[in-house]
Image (cartoon, rainbow, N blue to C red):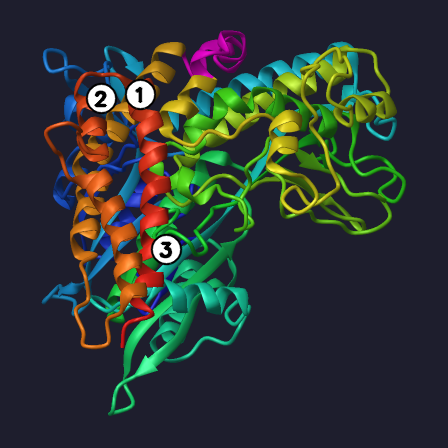
Amino acid sequence: MATTNHELLYYIPAGQYGKEGVLALLEQHPEIKFVSLVGIDLAGNDTDEKIPMSAFFDDYESFFEGRAVQTDGSSVVLTNIATLNNARVDMWGDPSVNWFVDYNYENIDPATGLPTGTLRIPAFLMHNYRYVDSRSILKRSCDYVKTELLNLIKEHGLPGMPHVKSDDVVDIIFTSATELEFWVKTPARTVTKKELSVSQKLQEQYWQRTHGTVRTALEQAVERLDKYGMVAEMGHKEVGGVKAKLDEFGHEAVVLEQLEIDWKFCNNPLQTADNELQARIIVREVFRENGLDVTFNAKPIIGVAGSGEHTHFGVMAKLKSGKLVNLFSPEEMRKEACSSLGIGAIMGLLKHYEAINPFISSTTDALNRLKPGFEAPVCIVTSFGTDPSEPNRNRTILCGLIRDIDNPMATRFELRSPNPYTNTYTALSLIFVSAFDGMKYAITCGKTQAQLLAEISKEVGESADYLDTNRAYRTEKDVFDDFTQEERNQMFGVAPATVWENVQGYYNNPELVETLSQGDAFAKDLMESFIASILKRWELVLANRLIPNNLDAVRNMVAIHTDSRNSVDDKRFAEVNDLRFYLAKDSDDRKSLFTRLTEALNAGEYDLASKLQIEMNDKMEELEAKYANYAKNIF
């Protein structure tokens, strides 16, 4: 039933109320004054409107028939789909998921004395009689995989799972969950990167006790997530941050910490993605109410820990008896790490990941996080553990098997590359479609569980029926410490350094894209729209944010003139100045790196722009190190 607390209605559970029940419930809560249809464009942005609740009461059905609200599709991210001369998009409410109430605690309703609420109804976006939004992509993908997997099980059975009769399988259940990491800080206050880096190396923050305002906000966020039915499991400090600094009155003057909040998994991927979106809203608002800024950027501070959003996924079968069986769990948990279908699922994801990666790590910020040394994945590789009878968790791989030996229902895979701004809807869509392709192989290839395990455990150069001969896909070693970069590149492929390099994994693998678009669930033109939008964003952010920000940084690295200056200082600043001029100063015989990069972007020379971006990043890192070395020698 609906959850209420302190007279507020936080959400309306899916399927528990018909039309009359919903309207009767809302009549009891006059503080909910607005309704909003929440559509999700291809970038993962959510729409928000303020429609008077009276309109919802007057014409309830129109909100679920695309007649209540239309939007300008050319103003949201539906690139090359909704164009200026064909921009109308109709919004269709979705009754299959929870509806959340978003309260404005700064706008108190005078009649009730309660904060003003907006009922947010998740919606689909229809353009030209076709759903084109992220939510509909995920729904179609799950519907397609469910139908095809049920047909395969009926025809071929469940190889390696003698404890499950295929004739008893009546439904497929997709399980999924996300984890939300984020940074919080006091507005307009800074902490040096060196302080953060040292604190991280000393491991002073991870799972430590929270204090003061951060503690209050974290506790309130966990409590509020519970009120919205998300069953928050925990909130804790992450690896990044420094101890809060107090002013002379004992008040917190400087706060900069990294946190994580987790909540319970869902059996409906649409609900998982809707929950994640609502959780971000809740976290941001709760911390703002406590005077703290929140950022969900993947790498808000270069050189210290970034924020991920590890995404868990599993597949279960529902039997005639109503019992659920985890299709990723083997019959004997202490003898085998994973079932044949589980092995097939991770094979499918890894095989297609180069084409999937642009949809997961879509921005420069996202790729900045995926660097060695920060427990973020850089290689397309998995881990199962060395001994099925012992717990194992390799934190250096892309997607690992998570299991509880005593609980077969907990077996799942954790994809570690997503970040808080990854479009969870399209990410889960591609995860389940690619996993299904591997599961189809496992069901139809005739191989035993041991033979499938041998295939995913193959060495580079060893031929395989499903996987690429020239790649390795599994390791139980530390990817960063036990392999050199050259070895990683040879075994697992070269990690993309820019958005342009990343989309080459999509462009250069048409056969993988063909598989990912099977069933027209995530149709090719929608994929092309997504790719076009992230390239446009890459170009705009690079030209209008990253280059200007770097230019400001270069201009600020000036000589520090003091009486104690000596020849060492002069030599060190000369090196700094040479780099400053190379990056930012044009001359008669040479254009600066910033100018050449800007010109390459304007000319659409993306290969060159990508190379120059990499050089810019390297040179800026070198410049910062040289300037820090120069500045530390000045009294």
Does the magenta stretch mainly form a helix, a strand or a loop?
helix
**Numbered mark located on residue 600 in the image:** 2
Q: Give the labeled residue for mark 1.
A: 608
Identify the residue under disc 3: 625
Q: Split into 4 quadrants, where in the image is the C terminus? A: bottom left
First in sequence: mark 3 vs mark 1: 1
Does the CB distance between marks 2 and 1 fall below 8 Å? yes
Residue 289 in view of the camera: yes
Residue 15 spot, x, y in % from top left = 44, 39
Q: Amino acid at mark 2?
A: Ala
Query: In the structure shown, which secondary structural element does the residue marked by tag 3 occupy?
Result: helix
Q: Position of residue 429 (x, y in %)?
A: 48, 26
Q: Is 78 displayed left or right of 283 in the figure? A: left
In the image, residue 322 above or below residue 533 = below
Q: Residue furthest front?
A: 567
Is residue 517 a member of the stretch shown in magenta?
Answer: yes
Q: Residue at x 78, y 51 (%)?
A: 391
Query: What amino acid type should be assigned to the residue bearing mark 3?
Result: Ala
Residue 132 visible at all: no
**Along the line of sight, the residue nearer the viewer: 152 or 517:** 517
User: Could you say which is closer to the camera, residue 603 or residue 301?
Assistant: 603
For the residue labelled by badge 2, is the local secondary structure a helix, a strand or a loop? helix
What is the magenta range? 506-523
Image position, residue 61 (x, y; %): 24, 29
Callout in the foreground (2, 3): 3
Which of pointers 2 and 3 lies earlier in the amino acid sequence?
A: 2
Given this view, does label 3 or label 1 mark the residue nearer the observer? 3
Mark 2 vs mark 3, CA separation in Å: 27 Å
